[in-house]
């Protein structure tokens, strides 16, 4: 069964899509069968993997409203182990169209049962809101990864999101966990970046991933070429950072699995 990781932060411009695309690509490079679901109506994760979001006729929107089976919406990418379900602005209408459906917050969770066994990881790129689409992602997910930009209001945004996650865990998804917080857009020349990073690490401790994603020109350029950064410039600092993030996630899973085995054997 796949681990389903939702990339969430209601604040825009924190690197959600950059993290979703490049983490998914890095996991795929490690030969983990990975599905990236673009659940943002802007469709930036789709275009970031070379898909023309304006012409796609089988998107996550069509899957969620029931006109296309989920398997038919899964597309190949330039990486052998990475698949994509694209999105576009049609998805804006989904929140309205799904309002009358009973248990509408569980639609994505039910749909994913058809493909869970096909993948090691499902990465969901969420939009910058806490509406019905993001709620569906959180209910479907086994864990939440929170990208946080190293800037002044970061702490406030994370605290609000964690309260929302705790509410969803209590009412809709008791197995939901916080995968961790990844610091993004870090500028080593900026004293504010260092101060915010230190404060977040101090407050959230082991929940913060060790790797810090730097501001990097190659990360910013890669989407315009329809490529994850590892295919655009594998030697860039951005590519190295997301490789390290994927490595941290994989190592944490091994440690957690060993701890669970030890606990069961005790």
Image: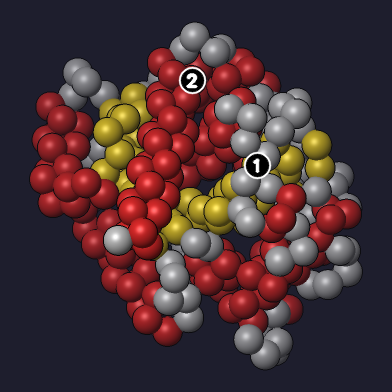
Which residue lies at the image location 26% right of the left edge and 49% below the top edge? 207
Q: Is residue 201 above or below residue 169?
A: above
**Residue at x-position 28% and y-position 57%:** 158
- Disc marking residue 239: 2
Q: Position of residue 214 (x, y in %)?
A: 34, 24
Image quadrant occupied by the C terminus:
bottom left
Q: Quadrant of residue 40?
A: bottom right
Q: Is residue 79 left or right of residue 203?
A: right
- Answer with left or right where residue 159 lies relative to residue 63: left
**Left or right side of 20 for 150:** left
Picture coordinates of residue 15, whole percent (x, y): 44, 40
Q: How many numbered marks appear? A: 2
Which residue was labeled with disc 1?
34
Graded by Cα atoms within 10 Å as few (under 14), some (14 to 19) or many (20 or more), the crowding at tag 2 reads: many
Task: Decide if residue 195 is in sight here.
Answer: yes
Q: Which residue is located at x 70 percent, y 80 percent?
A: 98
Query: Considering the numbered disc 1 on the image, is that residue within a helix, a strand or a loop?
Result: strand
Q: Is residue 92 left or right of residue 198?
A: right
């Amino acid at each position: 069964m796949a681990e389903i990781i939702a990339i969430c932060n209601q604040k825009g411009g924190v690197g959600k899509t950059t993290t979703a695309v490049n983490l998914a690509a890095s996991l795929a490079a490690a030969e983990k069968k990975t599905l990236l679901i673009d659940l943002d109506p802007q469709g930036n994760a789709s275009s970031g993997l070379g898909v023309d979001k304006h012409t796609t006729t089988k998107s996550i929107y069509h899957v969620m409203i029931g006109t296309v089976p989920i398997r038919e919406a899964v597309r190949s990418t330039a990486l052998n182990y990475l698949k994509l379900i694209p999105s576009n602005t049609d998805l804006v209408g989904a929140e309205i169209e799904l309002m009358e459906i009973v248990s509408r917050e569980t639609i994505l969770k039910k749909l994913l049962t058809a493909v869970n066994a096909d993948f090691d990881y499902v990465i969901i790129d969420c939009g910058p809101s806490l509406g019905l689409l993001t709620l569906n992602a959180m209910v479907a997910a086994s864990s939440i990864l929170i990208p946080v930009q190293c800037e002044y209001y970061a702490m406030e945004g994370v605290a609000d999101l964690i309260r929302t996650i705790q509410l969803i865990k209590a009412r809709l998804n008791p197995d939901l966990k916080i995968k961790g917080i990844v610091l993004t857009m870090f500028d080593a020349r900026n004293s504010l970046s260092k101060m915010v990073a230190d404060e977040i690490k101090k407050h959230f401790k082991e929940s913060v991933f060790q790797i810090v994603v730097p501001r990097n020109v190659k990360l910013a350029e890669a989407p315009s070429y329809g490529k994850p950064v590892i295919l655009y410039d594998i030697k860039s600092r951005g590519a190295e950072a997301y490789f390290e993030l994927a490595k941290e996630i994989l190592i944490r899973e091994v440690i957690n699995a060993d701890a669970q085995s030890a606990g069961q054997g005790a």
